[in-house]
Image (cartoon, helix red, strand yellow):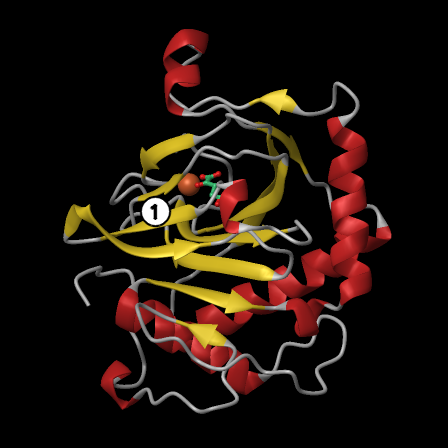
Amino acid sequence: MDNPTVTPIRDPLSFTASPELDVVAGSDILVVDAGQAGASDVSDDWLDQLADGLSEHGWMSLDVRDRLGPVLLEALRDEVAILDRTDAMKTAGIGRGSDLVRDRAVRRDRIAWLQGITPPQAELFRFLDAIRCGLNQRLFLGLKRFETHYATYHPGDFYKRHLDSFRGRASRVVSLVLYLNEGWAPEDGGALQVFNRDNENEVCGMIVPEAGRMALFLSEEIPHEVLPANRTRYSLACWFRQDEVPLPL
Ligand SMILES: O=C(O)CCC(=O)C(=O)O
Ligand SMILES: [Fe+2]
């Protein structure tokens, strides 16, 4: 592991994939768990898998449909769809002073920050906080808090290759993206392309933004890019942070 902030407590090489695992890490495609998980179900085993995947590969793609439940996913999708019809969704910038022309060349999504106040958001926040605590216990990341926003990409919108945080800034450490789109087809575009952390020109994963799919990766290490969407794309991005008060990215 070349990131000094990530210190696995177990040898990550001892990670073995079980057939029930609903995790895809790197190029290993594993079977989706269609088990009995209830709403926002976060088990120790599942948190072990997240920690192992992050320490071994730096990123992973998971199916959390059964963990969050279809009702919560639909409620979150309804919220962002409603916000998208108002002026609540704001043009997103890239965090180095405002320059609309430059920013629009890099990203075209619109965002609205979540406060955790509505019932679906409160339930989502419990899920995210369980992940925060679980990763801290296993990887000693010292994640103090998380921030999360909805994002909409309208047809033609994209987000060029980027990192979510600058190395050593200890702000955003782990990124999580949850997708909210039912029936997303390959021709709808909008995949999240993940690049090799040691060679940013090598694509090592494509994540289709289907409802219930979740991406998890190290914010400072994993270059990624949202390909142009051909249909309105709803998602929710979250960053687990080491700083207690907001610092610039
Ligand atoms: O929506 C996605 O797939 C990723 C979004 C992203 O990279 C970001 O908001 O930083
Ligand atoms: Fe990103």
Q: Toward the viewer: 157 or 175? A: 157
Identify the residue at horizontal 43%, vertical 51% (top origin): 242
Query: Can you give x and y, in whole percent of width and height, for residue 145 in the image?
Result: 55, 52
> In which quadrant of the rendered image does the N terminus lie?
bottom left
Determine which residue is flagged by label 1: 170
Residue 230 in which image quadrant: top right
The furthest residue to the right: 119
Say which residue appears at 45% left-offset and 30% top-offset. 158
Report if residue 147 is visible in the image: yes
Q: Quick check: 148 above or below 249?
A: below
Residue 97 versus residue 165 in the image, above or below: above
- For badge 1, the amino acid type reads Ala
Q: Is residue 145 above or below residue 246?
A: below
In the rendered view, would you say 129 is above or below 114?
Answer: below
Quadrant containing the C terminus in the rendered view: top left
Left or right, 153 with reference to 104: right
In the rendering, at what x and y percent does residue 64 appear?
61, 68
Q: In the shown orientation, is residue 248 left or right of residue 126?
A: left
Q: Residue furthest front?
A: 187
Q: Foreground: 135 or 18?
A: 18
Residue 122: % across, % down: 78, 55
Q: Residue at x 52, y 35 (%)?
A: 229
Q: Tell me, yes or no, if residue 137 can be seen here.
A: no
